[in-house]
Amino acid sequence: MNSGIDLQEIFIESLMDLGIPPGAAKAIWMPLPMFLMIIGATVGVLVTVWLERKISAAAQQRIGPEYMGPFGVLAPVADGMKLVFKEDILPAQSDRLLFTLGPVLVVIPVFLSYLIVPFGQNLVITDIGTGIFLWVALSSIAPIGLLMAGYSSNNKYSLLGGLRAAAQSISYEIPLSLSVLAIVMMSNSLSTIDIVQQQSGYGILGWNIWRQPFGLIVFWICALAECERLPFDLPEAEEEIVAGYQTEYSGMKFALFYLSSYVNLVLSALLFSVLYLGGWNFPIPIDLLASLLGVSETDPWLQIITASLGIIMTILKAYFLVFLAVLLRWTVPRVRIDQLLDLGWKFLLPVSLANLLLTAALKLVFPFAFGG
Amino acid sequence: MLKFLKQVGDYAKEAVQAGKYIGQGLSVTFDHMRRRPITVQYPYEKLIPSERFRGRIHFEFDKCISCEVCVRVCPINLPVVDWEFNKETKKKQLKHYSIDFGVCIFCGNCVEFCPTNCLSMTEEYELSTYERHELNYDNVALGRLPYKVTNDPMVTPLRELVYLPKGVMDPHGVPDTARRVGQLPEEILEKSEK
């Protein structure tokens, strides 16, 4: 199997040819993908915000943002600019340190999780052995930040929102991890690259979507709950508790919360596409297409096309899921807190456990199809 | 054991049903995406109010006989009629007339009962001011010609849904001369008189 373009190796080798020592060459390379990923994630958020507004408008027979740039694409940029220039208000009786630390603790793990999102065989910041576990672990830091923000605001609505956020994140983390575990069991690896590798080869038929129909539903519901998206947006339910833990926040600190919620949505969508929709794979295997057209596997043209197609496929799949999330937002009403916990503990947890058991059994019985 | 299995089966059935309902809801939301927006881009486009619209009240000073019927029929006795008896002509002479549109409920009773038709309804509805006392219109302000959507060169007037030709749903680009759906009020009147 050809591994495609390895930008890192090419970059480091060409720097070493210029007479730079290998260590320095690696150090020069390292910030590049990180910087690119942060920019990519931020632009992804802008696109998501715009899409959310446009799709919401379409679902409600409105037009949505129209005059800010072509089709209103600059609307989220204007939103961001406004938030940057707004006054950063600190409530009088709040805890200064925790109030500032809250949004920081929410944002950093979300951006850190982009470390493990692959866009191609070698297009990932780090292919660490504990990849998907790192994401699960990082996503449980955010509730601490939310709780901190809620408690330090010295506001009953904020406290309620923070407590709800913590309860929600903790109860939905478990079925989420269990559904991820079923995937991990099939691919025998926690690495996101290996998980995608295991799905490639048969095109759309090889994707985990066919092997994990229950895990897929559980994962998507949990991901929506983790992102606090609409059927589960209790922590910031504006009809009940003003804006939850965000009530006292303004300016840049509010922008961090806003940013992190959308980055988290895009991240969940990306990981969904990695775990269940075959990541960067094209619905028809490219190797097959190439051999049909008589193109050699080592052809540089083919490699470039494969790499760019991989990035496009990953992003397309992720944005399809974002679209689904927005559509769900205008379809499903918000659940109550007892219904939320009911769904988490009494439905998703048993279903994901049963799914795990089923996957284990199928793996033993059909090792060829379920990754023996 | 059997009871437990039955419970599991019922639970699964319920879950499937819930999924089905969410799917139905999603299809409704998805269907809305292909419908055309009904947006009226307000400061640039405005709907033409219907002929029965009750907007700002217009007042003609010279027609008024200071009978104060408008005050009597008003639910809150709102119009202020300031008159003086002219001994030479032996008639009431109107000095000032005012209506406070911050308090008026636009019920139209005054217009209905005015014996000399000096009060009339207009289609003007953009009454917002920076201060509520500015809404207290005196006889000069009440006598101003009403703003009309169709006369404003900066505004694209749009017809409301019931005033569109038959089968047309989108008011954009419908020519002025296109006849509205159904019978016109004059025609209904003519038919009833026959």
Image (cartoon, helix red, strand yellow):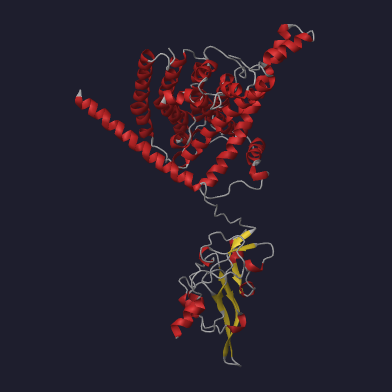
Residue B92, image x, y percentages: 57, 86
Relative to A181, does residue B151 appear above or below in the rendering?
Answer: below
Q: Is residue A61 visible?
A: yes
Is residue A213 found left or right of A4 in the rendered image?
Answer: left
Is A82 in front, or is B91?
A82
Is residue B97 found left or right of A199 in the rendered image?
Answer: right
User: Which residue is at a point 58% across and 35% down the rendered structure image?
Assistant: A48
Residue A73, image x, y percentages: 64, 41
| Quadrant assignment for the C terminus of chain A | top left
Residue B147, image x, y percentages: 63, 69
Residue A47, image x, y percentages: 61, 36
| Quadrant assignment for the N terminus of chain A | top right
Is A317 in front, or is A81?
A317
Which residue is outermost to the right?
A: A18
Q: Can residue A96 be seen in this view?
A: no
Q: Indicate the quadrant where residue B150 lies.
A: bottom right
Q: Indicate the quadrant where residue B102 lies.
A: bottom right
Is A4 in front, or is B21?
A4
